[in-house]
């Protein structure tokens, strides 16, 4: 009986420590997402205001998107067009950042459930989906990307939204996704997905 009591206390402590670690990492990811989204949204607003002040010609450089590298592409573009492309690129990488981190949490929890036979994955993931901005507000990123495509089409593609979407997507895919994601998101934010995965795996492995 005493043995069972001690084991139960140990189990509760393990669960508590694991959840504290998870909560801390979830809050880090959400805080970074909120800061970064506010930043790109403000840049989008500033660029939209700026478009009315400029007299720059709206030239369609879509053909140059087939160039072999991003450097080649940039050589054919105006600085103003590059600003729009780079903004879309950052928004795209922010979307990837959110997906990668959610996947890291799911995998870590799945490993926990398997190794400990204490089911946490379903309930915890439901909590993330319902309450955490980096997941529940993901539609905001998609909406922003859609708005970017529309404005870009008006400025550089004679109103052709499909062409604008293709150009923006090609430009974004021209970068190596993971390395560019880390570089774009900055030191701490860019390493969050790695830190989360390692932290979860460590806690599961050494329980």
Image (spheres, helix red, strand yellow):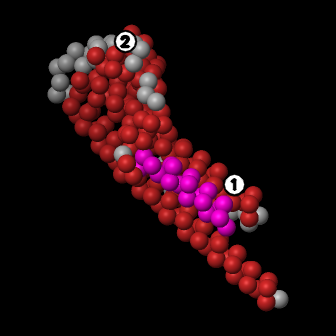
Q: Which residue appears at 64% of the width and 77% of the height?
A: 13
> Where 21 sits versus 167, above or below?
below
Hey, which quadrant is residue 53 in on the image?
top left
Quarter where residue 179 is shown: top left
- Tell me: residue 151, above or below residue 182: above
Q: Is residue 31 visible?
A: yes
Which stretch appears magenta? Answer: 189-207
Q: Position of residue 75 (x, y in %)?
A: 28, 16
Residue nearer the viewer, 136 or 17: 17
Residue drawn where x is 60% and y is 60% of the image: 202
The local secondary structure at tag 1 comes to: helix
Residue 43: name its quadrant.
top left
Task: Say left or right for 198 vs 38.
Answer: right
Q: Is residue 152 above or below residue 93?
A: above
Q: Residue furthest top?
A: 63
What residue is shown with label 2?
Answer: 64
Residue 139, magenta (yes or no): no
Name the side, left or right, on which 46 lies relative to 67.
Answer: left
Residue beneath disc 1: 110
Q: Residue furthest front?
A: 206
Magenta span contains residue 202 = yes
Give left or right: position of 155 versus 107. left
Picture coordinates of residue 134, whole percent (x, y): 49, 50
**In the depicted structure, whether residue 50 falls above or below residue 155:** below
């Amino acid at each position: 009986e005493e043995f069972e009591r001690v084991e139960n206390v140990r189990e509760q402590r393990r669960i508590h420590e694991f959840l504290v670690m998870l909560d801390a990492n979830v809050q880090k990811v959400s805080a970074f997402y909120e800061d970064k989204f506010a930043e790109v949204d403000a840049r989008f607003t500033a660029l939209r205001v700026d478009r009315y002040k400029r007299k720059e010609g709206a030239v369609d450089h879509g053909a140059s998107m087939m160039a072999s590298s991003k450097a080649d592409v940039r050589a054919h573009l105006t600085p103003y067009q590059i600003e729009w492309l780079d903004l879309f690129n950052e928004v795209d990488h922010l979307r990837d950042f959110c997906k990668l981190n959610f996947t890291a949490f799911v995998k870590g929890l799945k490993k926990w459930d398997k190794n400990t036979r204490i089911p946490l994955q379903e309930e915890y993931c439901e909590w993330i989906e319902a309450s955490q901005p980096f997941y529940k507000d993901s539609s905001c990123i998609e909406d922003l990307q859609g708005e970017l495509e529309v404005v870009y089409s008006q400025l550089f593609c004679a109103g052709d939204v499909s062409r604008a979407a293709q150009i923006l997507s090609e430009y974004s895919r021209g970068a190596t996704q993971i390395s560019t994601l880390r570089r774009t998101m900055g030191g701490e934010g860019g390493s969050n997905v790695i830190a989360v995965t390692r932290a979860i795996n460590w806690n599961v492995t050494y329980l």
